[in-house]
Every structure is written in structure tokens, then in C-alpha cells.
Image: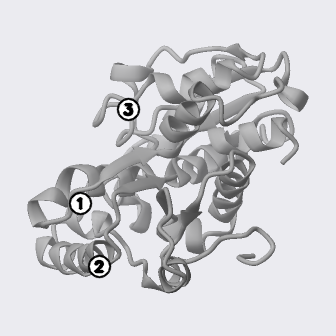
Amino acid sequence: MSEAMKVPTMAEMNAKGETPEVLFWVGCAGSFDDRAKKITKAIVKILNKAGVKFAVLGTEESCTGDPAKRAGNEFIFQMQAMANIQVLNGYEVKKIVTGCPHCFNTMKNEYPDLGGSYDVVHHTQFINTLIKDGRLQLEGGGTFKGKRITFHDPCYLGRANGVFEAPRGLIEKLDVELSEMKRCKERGMCCGAGGAQMFKEAEKGNKEVNIERTEQALETQPDVIATGCPFCNTMMTDGVKNKEREDNVQVYDVAELIATAEDL
């Protein structure tokens, strides 16, 4: 994939004496989960289209430590974080773009205490900046033109960091109808995977969190449920399948919407 999609590593760029504009932090999901890899590719296509000089860490990238910290293992978190910070500082990284709100939140808010201070932005924020600066032009909605789309706010992007408008701004540029759920923005609801819940069995209750959230999304009668997080993408996709609506409701990351509409 690297060669076909032109994704240099920091080590390769460093060896040539070059410095990238941004480091693209892929994240564990974006690296290993087959569904999330498609989101990673969409982000790469957008960065290439805009002519952004970027690099990835490749095998030097490790988990940010978010799941360990949320699960209560501060020791493992600090070990993982310190190892990453050592690599990032070694390359003198200044700006990081990531497609995962968990990585975004951890590196933005928790790494500075451990000696890792970077300008960390979510991919929807960065793509918005590219459009604002005239580096990326969108032709319109393409296959999504006129479709009804609802956006599910990832907790670590929305409620935790106040980023609500960047993803919505991108969706609205696609000539679609943005239909909000009753619980959105500051009142948004978790998909059920945050706080390391992604990696454990659900506890007893009368309904899974992702089913509740999917029902709220389906109330808006959407053609597409959009999100900005690989965990949310998995949970909403599973919810749509549970409701047997996968034939008429699709789940896409905002980056995938842009890349598909632009036929990248």
C-alpha cells in the first residue's frame, strides 16, 4: 500500500534530510482493522490530492496508551506514551494529524505532561483548513448529492474537545441534507466503545449502547450515518446490521465521504 499510495515514513524522509509538513498518526485501528484501513486510505488520498508533504512513523508507531489509561492502568499508559514521545521528539515532530479521536485526545491533552507537546489536529479539522487555504477544492457531493446524512459525534472529538463544526462543515460542502439527531453536539451520546469498552464484553443490561445510539440515528431517516472515529464506525455499523438496515443505510467516515465524492 505504501508505494502505490505514496506514504513515506519519517525515517525515509529524515534520511533524505527532508522535513514533512505534518506527521499522519495512523493509530492502531487505522493500521490493523480492515474496515478502518479504508478510512486511513481515504485520508491519505485527500492529503495527496491537496499536495500535503506528510509522513507516517510506520513500525515506529505504537499505541498511544489510551485504552490502558481508560481501563485504569496508568503504568502501562505512561510506558507507551513515553516510548512514543521519545520517537516523536527524536524526529522533532511539530504537527500531528490523526483520524482517531482517542489518539487525538491523548496526544493533545495528556502527552504534554510527559514531555510531548505537539500541535495535534483531527483529520476533519485539517481537511477544513486545506479547503479554507485553497489547497483542496471540492467539486460537490458526487454520489452523495442530495442524500440525507446524520453525523454521530465521537465523544473524544465532540464533548471532550469541543470540535463540532469541522466535520459538519465538510459534510455540508457535499450538497447533502445534514439531519441532526436529537442528541448531538454537547448532548451527543457515546457509541459504546469509549473508555476501552471496545475491547471487553458488554456488562448486563437491557440494551447495548450502540443499539440505542443507532436507533437515535435511524430516527433521522438517513441514507448515511457519518462519523469521525474508527471505533464509532464499528459500533454504528454493527448497530445498523443488528437492525437489518445495511441495505439502505451506510456508515462512512467523513474522510471517506470526501474521497468518494471527489472520486479519489
Image quadrant where one finds the N terminus: bottom right
Amino acid residing under circle 1: Arg
Q: Is residue 52 left or right of residue 110?
A: right
- Whichever of labels 1 and 3 marks the residue nearer the N terminus, that label is 1
Q: Quadrant of residue 106?
A: bottom left
Q: Position of residue 157 (x, y in %)?
A: 39, 38
Res. 192 visible in picture = no
Q: Secondary structure at mark 1?
A: helix
- Total label count? 3
Say if residue 188 shows up in the picture. yes
Q: Nearer the viewer, mark 2 or mark 3?
A: 2
Q: Residue at image x 84%, y 48%?
A: 264
Of badges 1 and 3, the one in the foreground is 3
The residue at 30%/49% (across/down) is 105
Task: Look at the image and name its color scheme.
Answer: one colour
Residue 90 is tagged as 2
- Secondary structure of the residue carrying tag 2 is helix
* Residue 187 location, quadrant: top left
Q: Badge 1: few (under 14), some or many (20 or more) residues near its Cα, within 10 Å?
A: some
Q: What is the three-letter code of the residue carrying label 2?
A: Gly
| Amino acid marked by disc 3 | Gly
Percent of width and height locating residue 129:
53, 33
Q: Is residue 142 left or right of residue 74?
A: right
Q: Which mark is residue 70?
A: 1
